[in-house]
């Protein structure tokens, strides 16, 4: 019989960095919950909403898997610069990208990774800032990987 409960975790560790889901953040910010996943050879950014662990009696492999519930951000092709060019495209190692401000995909959108995936499939945390002088406003991110 399937165990009818899950544990909601306060945080998870990924490469020594603490990922705190937005549902557990005490600062009311998404700062330490913004992540990047590489899926089908493409980078996706999202916000970890919950970290859960499901323990199933008799199945030892599932007892240590931490699952991340992720809301995926929608990519934007806009740039905050007047000339419309992306100067950071010359430096792909920085991982600078723009995203539609405060816009997320619908759950289980087929053009994006699954909304629930193992924590160890997250590539890294990313930093995000708001670009408010553009119309519409944008989010800009940069990777925090090694």
Image (tube, rainbow, N blue to C red):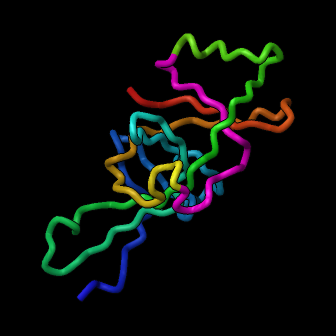
Which quadrant would the C terminus be assigned to in this image?
top left
Q: Is residue 137 depicted above or below 103 in this figure?
A: above
- In the image, farthest residue toward the bottom: 1
Based on the picture, tell me whether residue 107 belongs to the magenta stretch. yes
Front residue (pair 52, 101): 101
Q: Position of residue 50 (x, y in %)?
A: 48, 63
Q: Position of residue 75 (x, y in %)?
A: 63, 39
Give the residue at x 77% y 24%.
80
Give the residue at x 61% y 47%.
73
Give the residue at x 47% y 19%.
93
Residue 28, quarter of picture: bottom right
Q: Give the residues in magenta.
A: 92-109
Q: Is residue 109 depicted above or below 125 in this figure?
A: below
Q: Is residue 84 depicted above or below 39 in this figure?
A: above
Based on the picture, tell me whether residue 44 belongs to the magenta stretch. no
Q: Is residue 30 left or right of residue 60?
A: right
Q: Is residue 72 left or right of residue 11?
A: right
Residue 12, quarter of picture: bottom left
Front residue (pair 108, 62): 108
Q: Is residue 140 left or right of residue 33?
A: right
Give the residue at x 42% y 58%.
68
Front residue (pair 103, 22): 103
Q: Position of residue 76 (x, y in %)?
A: 68, 35
Residue 139, quarter of picture: top right
Front residue (pair 85, 22): 85
Q: Is residue 14 left or right of residue 55?
A: right
């Amino acid at each position: 019989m399937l165990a009818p409960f899950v544990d909601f975790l306060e945080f998870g560790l990924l490469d020594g960095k603490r990922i705190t889901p937005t549902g557990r953040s005490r600062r009311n910010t998404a700062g330490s919950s913004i992540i990047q996943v590489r899926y089908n050879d493409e980078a996706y950014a999202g916000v970890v909403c919950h970290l859960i662990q499901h323990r199933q009696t008799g199945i030892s492999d599932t007892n240590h898997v931490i699952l991340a519930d992720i809301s995926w951000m929608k990519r934007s092709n806009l740039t905050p610069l007047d000339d419309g060019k992306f100067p950071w495209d010359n430096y792909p190692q920085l991982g600078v990208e723009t995203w539609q401000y405060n816009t997320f995909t619908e759950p289980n959108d087929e053009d994006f990774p699954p909304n629930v995936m193992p924590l160890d499939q997250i590539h890294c945390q990313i930093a995000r800032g708001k670009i408010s002088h553009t119309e519409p406003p944008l989010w800009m991110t940069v990777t925090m990987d090694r």
